[in-house]
Amino acid sequence: MLHVISVPAFSDNYIWLLSNEEKKYAAIVDPGDAQVVLEALEQQQMQAIAILITHHHSDHIGGIAKLLHKYPDIPVYGPAGESIPNIHYPLDANKPIYLDKLDLNFDILDIPGHTVGHIAYYHADENAKSLFCGDTLFANGCGRVFDGSLKDLHDSLQQIAALPEDTLIYCAHEYTLDNIGFAKWVEPDNQDLDLRQQACWELVDNNHATVPSKLALELKTNPFLRTHIPTVIARAEEVANRKLNSASEVFAVLRIWKDTEYD
Ligand SMILES: [Zn+2]
């Protein structure tokens, strides 16, 4: 059974330690900073057994070399479609992985868009379904397009939206309140957004993370997963000042609007 520990890094990143009920070994997702990971492993009295990378950005891979210095024999998994130093096992959607020391399987999702080869790791067991999706889907938002495309990012978000609704979304940044602010530009009358904002304020006020979130909540409040909803389409058409003919076009208008006027 998967057990997840969050390790805050830099100003707003989350690095995830994946363990099981033994809490003896850990796989590390996107170690941008080795030092905070080494401290967390020591505090938890856990031993690193693998590194899982979602994409090539430095705040996700910056700690790999230092972790390999301390744990020279552990495997590093990462996207086949990106060039990243020290990746031993390039992955794509056809290559699920099994971490034997944890007795855990992960399916791989190809989710390009934020970057061209971005992947996610998905695990389901009797306790929970969990997705580690890097910078693709954020709590109440999504990543920017760097070297991928808007069309690919929308397709990737649709792929995530089709997962079971009780999937826990472990994204890599604490951006939720900021994302809710933009979502209210898109859907000022969405009462689920007001409720989510209230709940997030309370979490943040008490020094709690707003991540992970459930996919079901994302489907109700995240505008980038709601590009088929009539009020969202109407708002995007108002912003673009033209008729939009597909969910993908609605997505592109929202993403560019956020990039240019909100962020
Ligand atoms: Zn990134």
Image (tube, rainbow, N blue to C red):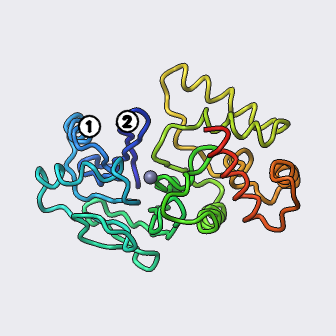
Q: In which quarter of the image is residue 94?
A: bottom left
Dot 2 surroundings within 10 Å: few (below 14), some, or many (20 or more)?
Answer: some
Pick whichever, 49 or 204, lies toward us.
204
Does the rendering let one see residue 20? Answer: no
Q: Which residue is drawn at 72% across and 49% down?
A: 223
Q: Where is residue 180 in the image (x, y as percent from the top left)?
A: 67, 36
Q: Where is residue 215 in the image (x, y as percent from the top left)?
A: 63, 52
Whether the residue under disc 2 has CB within 8 Å of ligand 1: no
Q: Is residue 184 above or below residue 198?
A: below
Q: Residue 178 carries which label?
A: none
Pick whichever, 262 or 247, lies toward us.
262
Q: Position of residue 217 (x, y in %)?
A: 68, 46
Report the side of 51 relative to 207 (left or right): left
What's the residue type where badge 2 is placed?
A: Pro
Q: Which mark is residue 36?
A: 1
Pick whichever, 2 or 63, lies toward us.
63
Q: Residue at x 39, y 67 (%)?
A: 105
Q: Residue at x 69, y 59 (%)?
A: 252
Q: Which mark is residue 8?
A: 2
Farthest-out residue, bottom: 94
What's the residue type where badge 1 is placed?
A: Val
Cβ atoms under marks 1 and 2 closer than 8 Å: yes
Pick whichever, 103 or 68, lies toward us.
68
Lower sequence index among marks 1 and 2: 2
Q: In this view, does 225 lie above or below 14?
A: below
The local secondary structure at tag 1 comes to helix
Q: Position of residue 28 (x, y in %)?
A: 31, 52
Q: In this view, does 130 lie above or below 246?
A: above
Report the side of 253 relative to 209 (left or right): right
Farthest-out residue, top: 205
Q: Quadrant of residue 177?
A: top right
Q: Distance between the residues labelled 1 and 2?
A: 8 Å
